[in-house]
Amino acid sequence: MTAIALCAALAVALMTSVFAQGRVPVVLISVDGLKPDYVLNADALNVKVPNLRRFLTEGAYSTGVRGVTPTVTYPSHTTLITGVSPAEHGILNNSPFDPLGTNDNGWYWYAEDIKVPTLWDAANQAGLVTASVDWPVSVGAPARYSIVQFWRAPIARPPGSDEDHKLLRALSTPGLLDEAERELGPYPAGYRYEPDDDARRAAFMAWMIGRKTPGLLTGYLASLDEAQHAHGPYDRRTLDTVERIDTFIGQVRAAAQQTWGGHYVLAVASDHGHIKTDRAVQFNAALHDAGLIDVDARGKVTAWRAFAWTAGGSAAIVSSDPANAEIRSRISGAMQRITGDPAAPIAQVLEGDAVRASEGFPGTVMIVGLKPGFRTGAALSGALITPVAAPGGTHGFLPDTSDMNASFFITGDRVPAGRNLGPIDMRDVAPTLAAKLGVALPRAKGHNLF
């Protein structure tokens, strides 16, 4: 027996021992923007997704996952692995609140900002091997084998020879990227999310399963989200991307089957849906007009008393002094200008107890949800409602908007076949997977779906 074969045999033996008491390895793949329709109504949409359709007969599925506030990628993915809402786990938007631009368009990349235990933490404490490929909010995450999600300074060169690749190598598990690339070729470092990039990431997930035999693997695919932002939901180019992603899921499943036989659980989840939008609401232009934002001659914010923290289909209005009655009055006046616009873009305004009940954007004066067809804009002056130059899909709407529903499919060891779970809460995913792993996640607010 070669040294490699011996190591593989020992790894399988160890895994068998670890999972001897009802535990099974869990693979969680997130497909950013996967709408339930794309699988549940695949025939009507003329979408060929045989691997995802297998979940409907061989496993269990939700008809729609109610998301979090806001329905954007980073808060949602953190809920998927913690079982709590953004106000509790601390990842409140894709990017931190930064009206002065001092963060230079940085995102919530760092796992140290997560305030509650994750599935990675619980699995580690149980002695399981944890792994991750491109999961959002994973820089510094406790996964033993981790290729993090991070981008900063991409250069237009092939993957493997740009500055973001150096960053990724430095921030991921030491030596891991080099080890995998020796077998697989270059990893698509940086903000690269075309279908070919996701094909590479799926190959790295399959490699991680075969080489590291993790008890928990989290992996992320995002080309569908990019397609919908560019073309909108249900566009043929979007549906073609769904079909390609289906093949990637099949490849990861094949690796799991080869490694563990039937003794594993595979879950596919998403973070939100999509709505096509063609008009933008310029909340900060209204706040600027109300004297609440100061800008210099170049149009850069120099000071603010109220500012809109935007999230696609919604915005949180933040006050520098929430107790200041004059500021609150000016905010109300600015919002009334938008509410009174003939285009009528606002669906709902949450204030006070309603903000707290949303469990998103804690401490903000109000959360404003837009109607379908509208998205938030970034202008600081000019018209309050503007056409979008390139209409496409948008998310971030309040979660009671049904088109924001996310997906959840699960199959494998002791998962009931053909089980329709109906509508579920996104917070249910983490405790359900924790139960399959045989680990405790006591802070989770959701429940085990089985």
Image (cartoon, grey):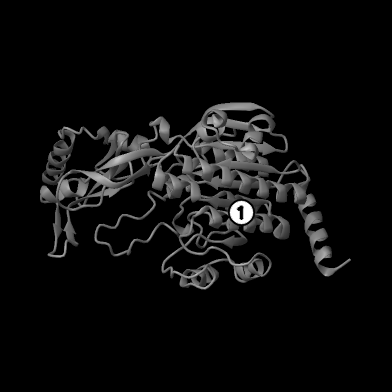
Give the residue at mark 1.
Answer: 202
| In-image side of 278 versus 154 (left or right) | left
Q: How many marks?
A: 1
Please say whether residue 132 is visible from this viewpoint: yes
Q: Quadrant of residue 412?
A: top right
x, y (%) of residue 389? 28, 48
| Residue at 46 percent of width and 72 percent of height | 163
x, y (%) of residue 114? 46, 53
Please say whether residue 89 is visible from this viewpoint: no
Task: Say which element carries label 1.
Answer: helix
| In-image side of 335 versus 93 (left or right) | left
Amino acid type indicated by mark 1: Ala
The answer to whether 115 is drawn above or below residue 315 in the figure is below
The answer to whether 212 is drawn above or below residue 2 in the figure is above
Q: Nearer the viewer, residue 116 or 202?
A: 202
Q: Quadrant of residue 360?
A: top left
The N terminus, quarter of image: bottom right
Q: Nearer the viewer, residue 420 or 231?
A: 231
The C terminus, quarter of image: top right
Q: Quadrant of residue 41?
A: top right
The answer to whether 222 is drawn above or below residue 155 in the figure is above
x, y (%) of residue 430? 56, 42
| In-image side of 377 versus 118 (left or right) | left
x, y (%) of residue 184? 65, 64
| Residue at 65 percent of width and 51 percent of height | 216
